[in-house]
Image: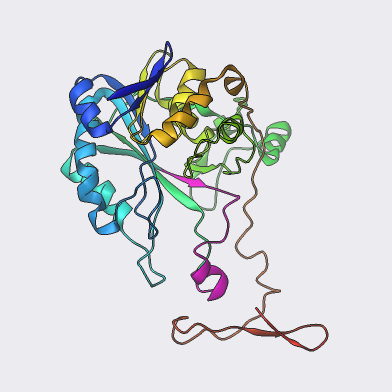
Amino acid sequence: MTEIFKTTLGSIQEVDSLSYMRESISDNSIDLVMTSPPFALLRKKDYGNMAEGEYVNWFEAFGKEFFRILKPSGSLCIDIGGSWIPGQPTRSLYHFELLIMLCRKLGFHLAQEFYWWNPSKLPTPAEWVNIRRIRVKDAVNSVYWLSKTPWPKASNRRILYPYSDSMKSLLKNGYHAKTRPSGHDISNNFSVDNQAAIPPNLLAIPNTESNSYYLRYCRERNLTIHPARFPSILPEFFIRMLTDEGDLVIDPFGGSCVVGDVCERLNRHWICCELDRKYTLGAIGRFDVESQKEQIYDATFYKIFNPSSLWEVNDIEPLNTDGGKERRLKIKKSSEGKGINQ
């Protein structure tokens, strides 16, 4: 075990996190486990990821330690992406099986499931989305918020966001209490100006990091950049909502130590465990003074189009009776009358 870096609030431990938790962390001592473990992806990654069939059994040992070390008021938040069955356009169930195991077998409660939508996500998987055109792009991760008891400490007042233009207009022009066609009774309280809105469990956060201090730090020193970094706003959402200043947060799959970076700025104690030295060396750069100044909060609204937006202009063509099993190229005539592949 090596403590490769330390601040007054936390440390990067270059260590197997399962052994570290068992040997160094007491029962009921952690306020939040915030992590993004390696996903069960079809392609093997440099940072290590388990195959789909082995994933739930592999993760169970970690789940037991998470349950042991969390305080009764604490939470476990897991960002996890889905996967596809090899060679066919159908989804793996591994992340659902993981959730069931954590709750039914280990005793966690599902406080709420969140969905991280990455507006900048490229159309993937390319074979099913771009080539055979039989699936839509996969742009959402699940984030499971779990707890030891049904009543973990939490407050949505910590993570409010600006009112939409329509809500501002409603507040300005007034709202008459009435029953909606759905049967919901909307009272006068709906028109109270609370200065901000309660967010939904769909988190629109683009993953577009291209020239951050962390990336520059690694490039200038010829250090390996971790390929699977979540944007800091994602863990910050949960750290703000579920912990107080001075609380202790651990990320057992630390990677480039985004969680530690956020905790350092928010005055939370933290531990990041990462086994691979080529990633821990770069993670140290997140705690430079200039890096800690870099965080910029963005009030951008991301627009989701109504699914019917282009239904009247899209060509209507017969569906493939084999469901797209045979790979075909669609021939479309250009303005010059020549056939082009699409």
Locate the C terminus by quadrant: bottom right
Question: Is 268 placed left or right of 107 in the picture?
Answer: right
- Of residues 278 and 307, the one nearer the viewer is 278
Q: State the image coordinates of residue 317 (x, y, percent, origin top left).
A: 60, 84
Q: Start and end of the magenta stretch?
A: 114-134
| Residue at x 72%, y 37% (from the top left corner) | 169
| Residue at x 44%, y 49% (from the top left corner) | 141
Locate the N terminus by quadrant: top left
Say which quarter of the image contains residue 19: top left
Q: State the image coordinates of residue 246 (x, y, percent, origin top left).
A: 40, 13
**Residue 117 painted magenta:** yes
Q: State the image coordinates of residue 30 (x, y, percent, origin top left).
A: 29, 22
**Is residue 69 visible in the rendered structure shown here?**
yes
**Is residue 157 visible in the rendered structure shown here?**
no
| Residue at x 68%, y 68% (from the top left corner) | 310
- Of residues 249 and 115, the one nearer the viewer is 249
Question: Is 289 placed left or right of 63 in the picture?
Answer: right
